[in-house]
Image: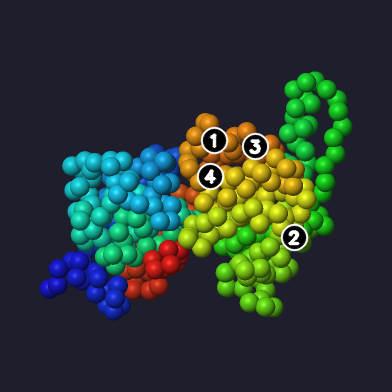
Amino acid sequence: MLPLIALLRRTVASGLVSDTQVVVGIFYPSNWFGDADGFAREVAALKALDPRVRVITERYDETHELRSARGTPGAKDQNLRGRAPALTKAQRKAFAMINVAVAIDLPYDVATHAPNLVWVQSVGAGTGQLQSAGLADVGVRLTSAAGVNAVGIAEFALARVLQHWKRLPVLDAARERHEWMPVYGRQLAGSTLGLIGLGAINSAVASRAKAFGMRVLATRRSATPGATALDIDELFPPGDLHAMLVQCDAVVAAVPETPETTGMMDAAAFAAMQQGSFFCNVGRGSFVDEPALIHALESGHLGAAAIDVASVEPLPGDHPLWDAPNLYISPHAAAVPGALFVNLHELFRENLTRFLANEPLRNEVDLARGY
C-alpha cells in the first residue's frame, strides 16, 4: 500500500478515492469562535462527516502585526522569520500528523513541519500570510473563506455611508452639547454607488444598495463590454476604474491583495472621484495610497472616507491617518465573528466532503496568481 501522503496526493491529482484516515487540524484559537459549546459541536460535526476523518485541535496563531506583514505582496520573509513564534512540542506533534489544516496562520516552511499536508482551509478571505508558508512550492492546495462574512461586512460598509450622509456624528455631537440643532442629511435613493471589485462582499453591498434605490456600478477583473451582473447597472473592467469613479457619489472597495491591486487607489484615482464624494475601503489596506487619501481629505476633494484596513496593522498611534479630517477609522472590525466562524465551518464541511469525494473545492486559490 502507498504511504498516506502518496495516497492523498494521488487522490488530489487523479481523483482516486482512498480509504486512508484523513487527519484534520484546527489551528485557529478556539476562543475566537465565541462559544465553547458551539465550537465543540462543530468539531463533532466534522468527526461525524465521514469515518475516515480524525480531528485534532491545537492553537497556532501569530501576532496581527506579523500576519499583516506576511500577507503583503512581495514581503521579504527573511526580515520576518525572526518574529515568528517557535513551535511548541504540542504544535510540532500536531503539524506532523495533519493532512488538512483549518488555519489563520502557518509556520514558515510548513512542509518541513507538516510533511503530510495536502490542503489548507483559510479562516479568512485573505490568504497572503498562509501563502508565505511555502504552499505553492510543495503543491499544497489552499481555499479561502471568501464570502463567509460578506453580509456583515457589507452592512458595515453601508452603515459608514449612512453615518456620513445622514450626518449622524454631527447630530451626536449636538446631543453631547445638549443643543437642539436640526441638521439634515441626504438620501441614498437616486445616488450612484461604485463598487471596486465584485466578490462576495461587494455583491452583498450591491443587493442592499439596490434595496435603498441606488444606482450601482462596479468593476470586475473579468468584465467585458456589455457584461452584466446581478444588482449591477453597469460593469467596468479595472482599466476603466476612473471612468466609473467620476460617476459615483460613494465608492466601496473590497479587492484582494495582489501586486496588481497594490496602490491602485492612488492620487489620480481620488482626483477622478466627484467633489465631496465618499470613499470606503473594507478590503485590503495595500489597495490605498494612504498619503493620497490624506491629501484628498485635507484638500476637501473628498467629503469623507472610512477605512477598516490599513497598510500597517495595528495602525501606529503616530500615523498621520489618525489626524486626517473626516476619516472614520475602524481596526479591521467590520466582520461579525459570531457569523464568520459558523459560516466558515459550514464551508469547510462542504469542502471536506468534496475533498473526500474527489470533487472541486469551493474558493480554491490559484497560487500562481495569489488569489
| Residue 298 placement: quadrant | top right
Where does label 3 land, which residue? 324
Task: State the residue at coordinates (82%, 49%).
Answer: 187
| Residue 306 placement: quadrant | top right
Query: Tag 3: residue type?
Result: Ala
Q: Residues within 10 Å of mark 2 (few under 14, many from 20)?
A: some
Where does label 1 land, which residue? 319
Query: Exactly how many numbered labels are in the figure?
Result: 4
Relative depth, front residue between 353 and 71: 71
Q: Is the residue 195 above or below the residue 316 in the image?
A: below
Where does label 4 land, which residue? 310
Query: Tag 1: residue type?
Result: His
Contact (CB < 8 A) between labels 4 and 3?
Answer: no
Element under label 2?
A: loop
Residue closest to the far left: 1
Q: Position of residue 320 (x, y in %)?
A: 58, 36
Looking at the image, tell me whether mark 4 or mark 2 is earlier in sequence order.
2
Where does label 2 land, which residue? 246
Relative depth, front residue between 106 and 41: 106
Contact (CB < 8 A) between labels 1 and 4?
Answer: yes
Looking at the image, tell me whether mark 2 or mark 3 is earlier in sequence order.
2
Res 89 seen here: yes
